[in-house]
Image: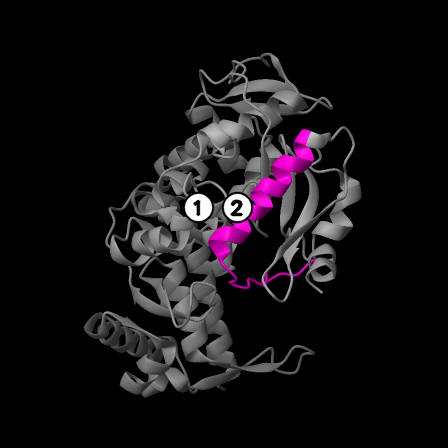
């Protein structure tokens, strides 16, 4: 990767977000596919995050729900699947092979081994790996016949899915587990099934399952190169620590992929070494100051492990839960300045926590974004899956 190149400071890193993350008013996207492609991945653990993250970046936010549902469930140009760090994301469908080979295969092997071990020991040997193979083959055949199905529907076709075993027998966390719930997560990690339409509205976390669309197999090292190149194009400069955290890879895998793509090292404020893709060393074109209201788990707020350059450590207690999940955030020109929530009647409310240097233009721009969000939500009440202190306070 050669010697360390030029310096990219905090101001420049924030400026890159306007265009690359589709947050500047002149950089907004036309379709959800453009948003997902620009960000590589949208957090999908909380279903509402996908819609809210897209809506914040669409030129016509009123089309958010219809367009995201079209992309996910009709055209299938976006797919919701397990990816980095055993987490559910929404990707452009053409990235499924890259994510699967670079990340999911290793996670899936661990998940299956754990399921078999827990199932055999927790059933006193009554359930076995061979038994599981028969059940999953039957369940996948039933799912293929149905097209999409809930777990409850699949258990009617294959009653053995309802079998239970004891997880953590004799330990403080001992609890009964059902084969169906664990098996579907394993099949999801293996890229054999994906989440389909929710049972209720777009905010629902109860999904149907569907057979995963086919994708070509890729050598893991090639897939890692491609995933890292795409992510670094969107989020560079980033450190080795950021890359290891985001991908969930070993540091040796991160370094190998960085070398393979010819990543260029640069210095960052504070003395750390970051990396950008070749040809990406130059400063971005100037952009107008921008405001944004981003949802909990938004890919911009969760893009890096080191977040001090865009989020003051003093704000974290109010904006994060105890597990490190970020809640809804208010942004001004590349930094987090507060948080937002909805009242019981659906009204969007926000509060500044770091108003230093914010003038009238910033306040008006944030208010405009809050009104824009409230307009396309049209009274739909969204409660984040991971609730944070400020969100709870504002929503009450």
Q: Residues within 10 Å of mark 2 (few under 14, many from 20)?
A: some
Q: Would you say residue 324 is visible in this rendering?
A: yes
Counting from the top left corner in percent of width and height, residue 390 is at 73, 55
* Residue 240 occupies quadrant: top right
Q: Which residue is mark 2?
A: 372
Q: Nearer the viewer, residue 364 or 144?
A: 364
Q: Residue at x 78, y 32 (%)?
A: 356
Q: Nearer the viewer, residue 275 or 89?
A: 89
Point out the stretch of residues depicted in magenta: 361-388
Q: Is residue 145 above or below residue 65?
A: below
State the quadrant of the C terminus: bottom right
Q: Looking at this view, is 269 or 49 the one in front? A: 49
Q: Dot 1 lies on which element?
A: helix
Element class at badge 2: helix
Residue 182: which disc?
Answer: none
What is the spatial separation of the Cα atoms under label 1 and label 2, in whole angstroms? 8 Å
Q: Which residue is mark 1?
A: 61
Q: Residues within 10 Å of mark 1 (few under 14, many from 20)?
A: many
Magenta portion: prevailing SS class: helix
Position of 99 with respect to 166 (left or right) is left
Q: Residue at x 45, y 18 (%)?
A: 278
Q: In this rendering, does residue 322 appear at all? A: no
User: In the image, what residue occupies the spot 39% across and 79% down?
Assistant: 128
- Colouring scheme, one of rainbow, by chain, secondary structure, one colour: one colour
Indicate the position of residue 224 as horizontal and vertical percent values. 41, 38
Seen from the viewer's position, the closer of residues 167 and 89 is 89
Asked if marks 1 and 2 touch (Cβ < 8 Å), the reply is: yes
């Amino acid at each position: 990767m050669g010697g360390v190149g030029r310096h990219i400071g905090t101001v420049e890193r924030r400026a890159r977000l306007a265009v690359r993350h589709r947050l500047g008013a002149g950089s907004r996207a036309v379709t959800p596919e453009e948003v997902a492609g620009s960000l590589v991945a949208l957090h999908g653990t909380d279903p509402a995050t996908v819609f809210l993250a897209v809506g914040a970046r669409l030129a016509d936010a009123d089309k958010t729900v219809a367009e995201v549902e079209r992309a996910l469930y009709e055209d299938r140009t976006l797919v919701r699947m397990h990816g980095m760090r055993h987490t559910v994301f929404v990707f452009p469908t053409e990235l499924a092979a890259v994510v699967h080979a670079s990340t999911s295969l290793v996670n899936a092997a661990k998940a299956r081994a754990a399921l078999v071990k827990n199932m055999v020991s927790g059933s006193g040997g009554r359930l076995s790996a061979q038994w599981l193979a028969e059940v999953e083959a039957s369940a996948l055949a039933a799912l293929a016949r149905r097209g999409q199905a809930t777990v409850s529907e699949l258990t009617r076709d294959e009653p053995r899915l309802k079998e239970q075993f004891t997880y953590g027998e004799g330990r403080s966390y001992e609890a009964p587990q059902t084969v169906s719930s664990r098996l579907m997560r394993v099949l999801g990690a293996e890229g054999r099934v994906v989440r389909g339409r929710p049972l209720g509205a777009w905010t629902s976390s109860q999904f149907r399952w569907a057979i995963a669309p086919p994708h070509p197999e890729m050598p893991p090292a090639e897939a890692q190169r491609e995933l890292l190149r795409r992510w670094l194009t969107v989020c560079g400069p980033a450190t080795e620590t950021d890359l290891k955290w985001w991908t969930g890879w070993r540091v040796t895998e991160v370094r190998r992929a960085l070398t393979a793509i010819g990543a260029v090292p640069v210095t960052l404020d504070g003395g750390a070494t970051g990396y950008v893709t070749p040809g990406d060393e130059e400063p971005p074109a100037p952009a107008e100051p921008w405001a944004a209201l981003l949802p909990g788990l938004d890919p911009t707020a969760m893009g890096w492990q080191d977040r001090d350059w865009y989020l003051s450590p003093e704000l974290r207690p109010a904006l994060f839960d105890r597990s490190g999940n970020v809640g809804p955030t208010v942004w001004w020109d590349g930094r987090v300045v507060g948080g937002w929530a909805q009242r019981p009647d659906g009204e969007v409310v926000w509060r500044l926590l770091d108003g230093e240097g914010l003038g009238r233009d910033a306040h008006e721009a944030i208010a405009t974004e809050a009104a824009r969000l409230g307009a396309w939500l049209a009274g739909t009440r969204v409660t984040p899956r991971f609730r944070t202190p400020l969100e709870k306070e504002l929503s009450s």
